[in-house]
Amino acid sequence: MGIVFAGIAPHPPLLIPQVGGGQIKKVEKTVQALKDLSRRVVDSGAESLIIITPHGPVMYDAVAVTDGDSIVGDFSQFGAGEVRQKLEIDGKLSVYLLEEANNAGVPVKFVPASNNYSPRQGTGLDHGAAVPLYYLEEQGFRAGGLHITYGLLSFSQLYKFGQVMRRAVERRGSKAAIIASGDLSHCLNPGAPAGYNPRGEEFDQKLIDLIAGYRVEDIMQMDPKLIEEAGECGLRSFIITFGALEGSHVTPEILSYEGPFGVGYLVAAFNIYSHAHTHPHPGENLEEIIPRLARDSIENYLDKGTIHSPPEHLPSELTAEKGGTFVTLKKRGELRGCIGTVEPVHSNLAEEIIKNAFSAAFRDPRFSPLQPEELSEIDISVDVLSNMELVEETSELDPRKYGILVRSDGQSGLLLPDLEGVNSVEEQLNIALQKAGISSNQSYQIYRFTVTRYAEKRSGGGE
């Protein structure tokens, strides 16, 4: 349970046939892409919708969350009052969102819903939300959810709010889709709403390239002057969404882009691959696949209560080879679980990783079992161990390069290499002996080994 799909949608009212009339033919690519995006939301199995808009009550000091039973709006200000949309509000999700935001120190304000759009008097359904909802409803999507208006906070705060949003969804125990509503530059040609500025096209192309490569950190660090001169209204919606997707395996897909009226209309999908059906994707390497195997194992157990088998079509290094592995979980930089095997006990390396990831999350006796709401805060690394080499002299040890295993009469203790605070052979050896319960006066054997570490490459902006 959690975020199962996300997308970017533009929101010009002329995309509504009753508003755009004949002009809608000029944005046919956008219309078809919105229909495609909406079908993907339906196919994702999402049970609720979170829509992030720039055209609700924008605040300087907080993110605005619409409060009430439902939010209703129409296109009367655009000459099509007969076209109406309604979003039922998930009250329980709102409560979880507020609690998580307070815990994280992210400012959130509830704004009462009304049946008429008025940023000063509360909020009805603005066109930033109503346009995407029109296409979602056309494809048969009827779920309720949340209506959120981004605030003029720093990018890092908005990203953090996205993380908060993800945790709230996980606590709710439902499958949610996110639609980030926003247009790109409003100054692409001389007739554009914000007038012409050549930097508008520069901004749009740069942002699209960064989204296509899912280079979130680079998006967060875009030139503020370029952003300002572009006259955009969607970037903050997108950044909240990136925060919500942190830790997920995301494949972006640009569905369409055009700007015939001087405003950039981007439709993009963020496909999220779940643990149960995870397969390697073209271009992926072991550095990406191995940590994802560990995360998928944990997600699968949280979702289904079972330990799943390795997915099909894994590289031969994971299916034909064996090896000891250690899986380490950290939460906000602090250890949250670490379990491993010195030597292989399962049929292949993939199974070794999956089983040890489960144990690190739910069977480490030093910690309580991992809870669903913690998952988005967890960083995962997997250490694959080399074969053990018997050491004759301590001069053969190096705590930065080698881990060690000490053994004596059935007792053993292991220490991984390159650990913070372990700077000498003596320190490494003493800690390993203490872990094994072996006295330094006893006779014992020392083995050394190397590890190859595979760590998740998380997006920028984390807590």
Image (spheres, helix red, strand yellow):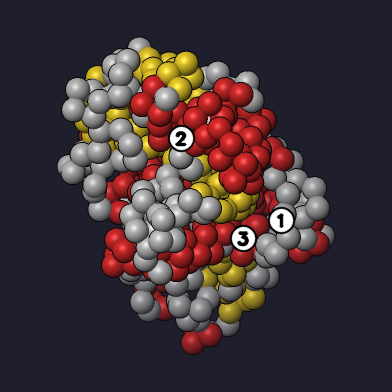
Q: In which image quadrant can residue 202 be found?
A: bottom left
Seen from the viewer's position, the closer of residues 92 and 61 is: 61
Residue at the image position 31 percent from the left and 47 percent from the top: 158
What residue would you read off at disc 3? Answer: 288
Task: Determine whether, in the image, residue 196 is placed left or right of residue 83.
Answer: left
Q: Tag on residue 13? A: 2
Please tell me whether mark 2 sits on a helix, a strand or a loop: helix
What residue would you read off at disc 1? Answer: 281
Residue at the image position 81 percent from the left and 53 percent from the top: 313
Seen from the viewer's position, the closer of residues 85 and 154 is: 85
Task: Determine whether, in the image, residue 296 is placed left or right of residue 259.
Answer: right
Between the C-alphas of marks 3 and 1, the distance is: 10 Å
Q: Considering only vertical position in the picture, is 385 above or below 379? A: below
Dot placed on the residue nearer the N-terminal end, 3 or 2: 2
Which amino acid does the dot numbered 1 rest on?
His
Between the C-alphas of marks 1 and 2, the distance is: 37 Å
Task: Determine whether, in the image, residue 424 is placed left or right of residue 324.
Answer: left
Please tell me whether mark 3 sits on a helix, a strand or a loop: helix
Which amino acid does the dot numbered 3 rest on?
Glu
Q: Which quadrant of the rendered structure holds the N terminus?
A: top right
Please identify the residue farthest to the bottom as the structure is shown.
395
Q: Are circles 1 and 2 on residues that touch, CB within 8 Å?
A: no
Residue 405 is at least partly visible in this image: no
Binning the other alpha carbons within 10 Å of mark 3 as few (below 14), some (14 to 19) or many (20 upward) gives some
